[in-house]
Amino acid sequence: MNDDGKKVTMRSIAKEAGVSLSTVSRVFSGDPHATPNIRKKVIGVARALGYAPNTITGQKAFSQSNLIGLVVNHPSGFYTSEVIECVEKEVSRCGYDLILCGAHDDLVREERIIASMLNRQVDGMIITTKRDAYSEELITRLNRIPVVYLGDKPRSAQNCSTVYLDNYYGGVIGTRYLCELGHRNIVFLGRRLTSKSQSKRAAGYEQVCCKNEWFCFGCFNADPLFYDCRFCNSWFTLL
C-alpha cells in the first residue's frame, strides 16, 4: 500500500517507471538480463511508491544498495588517482554509485572503513590493502559479498578476485631496459623498503645487477637502514 491506501502492483511500478511489465518482473526475479541502470530505476520507483515485495527474490533485489565501496591507501597518489578515475567511470556506467575512502597508512582505520561500508550494505568492494590479515569477524562479513583486491590480499580472504602486479618482474625489465641503453651504474630509488611492492621491485633490480656482476646501490628516503643484497655481498644505502 502507498500513502493513499492504494495497493502498489508491478503494473503500477512499470507505468511510473516507463518500462514494460515484463521488465519489472525481470528485475524482481533477479534476471541477469535486467541491466543495472534499469534495475536501479525500477527499484527506486518501487521504493518511492511504497512497494513491498512478497517473494524471496524480490526482497533480495530490494535489498541491493547499488553502492560499490573502494578502499585505497592514499587517494591523491598518482597511480591511485588513475585507478579511482577508472573505477568511478566503470561503476557509473554499470548503474552503481561509488563510496571512496582512504586509509592513509592507518591499519586500524582501514578495518573501520571496511566495516562501515559493510554496514551501509555495499553490493561489492574493491580494496588495496597492506594488511596480511583482517580480523576473523571482518573476513567473515567480506566473504559474503563480491570483493576484488588490487595487489596482495589478506591470507584468510576467500571468494574474492585479485588484480595482481608482478612487481618483481617490473624491477627486472626496468633494469634490463637501462642495460640495453648501455648503462651500468644503475641506482634503485624507492620510498620505503618495508613496502611489499617496492621490496619486490628492488629484488628484481638486484637479480639483474648481480647476474651481470654489477654493484647494487639503492636509496629509500623513508627507511634509515642498511639492506644486504640477497644475491651478492653488496648492500643498499637507505637514506
Image (tube, rainbow, N blue to C red):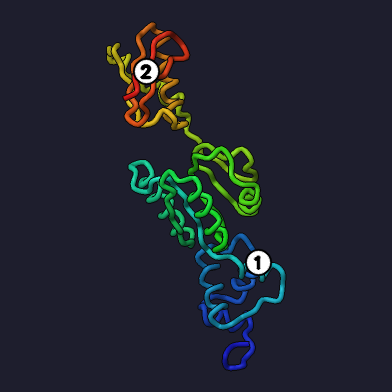
Q: Say the numbered circle drawn on residue 110.
A: none
Q: Residue at x 36, y 14 (%)?
A: 216
Q: Residue at x 33, y 47 (%)?
A: 76
In the orientation shown, which residue stands out farthest toward the right? 55
40 left or right, relative to 180: right
Real-space CA distance between mark 1 and mark 2, rounded to the nearest whole angstrom: 56 Å
Q: Residues within 10 Å of mark 2 (few under 14, many from 20)?
A: many
Callout 2: helix, strand or loop?
A: strand
Tell me if residue 192 comes above or below residue 176 in the rendering: below
Callout 1: helix, strand or loop?
A: helix
User: What is the x, y in percent for residue 39?
Assistant: 55, 67
Q: Amino acid at mark 2?
A: Phe
| Residue depth check, mark 1 versus mark 2: number of the one nearer the observer | 2
75 left or right, relative to 129: left
Tell me if residue 111 comes above or below residue 239 in the rendering: below
158 left or right, relative to 226: right
155 left or right, relative to 211: right
Please name whichever residue, 216 or 161, is drawn nearer the observer in this view of the structure: 216
Tell me if residue 3 comes above or below residue 119 in the rendering: below
**Which residue in the structure is indicated by mark 2?**
236
Q: Quadrant of the C terminus?
A: top left
Q: Residues within 10 Å of mark 1 (few under 14, many from 20)?
A: few
User: What is the x, y in percent for residue 90?
Assistant: 44, 53
Q: Quadrant of the N terminus?
A: bottom right
Tell me if residue 2 comes above or below residue 30 in the rendering: below
Task: Tell me which corner region of the image, top left, top right, bottom left or bottom right, holds residue 182.
Answer: top left
User: What is the x, y in percent for residue 2?
Assistant: 59, 88
Q: Say the numbered circle drawn on residue 60.
A: 1
User: What is the x, y in percent for residue 156?
Assistant: 64, 41
- N-term-proximal mark, 1 vs 2: 1
Q: Amino acid at mark 1?
A: Lys
In the orientation shown, which residue stands out farthest toward the bottom? 4
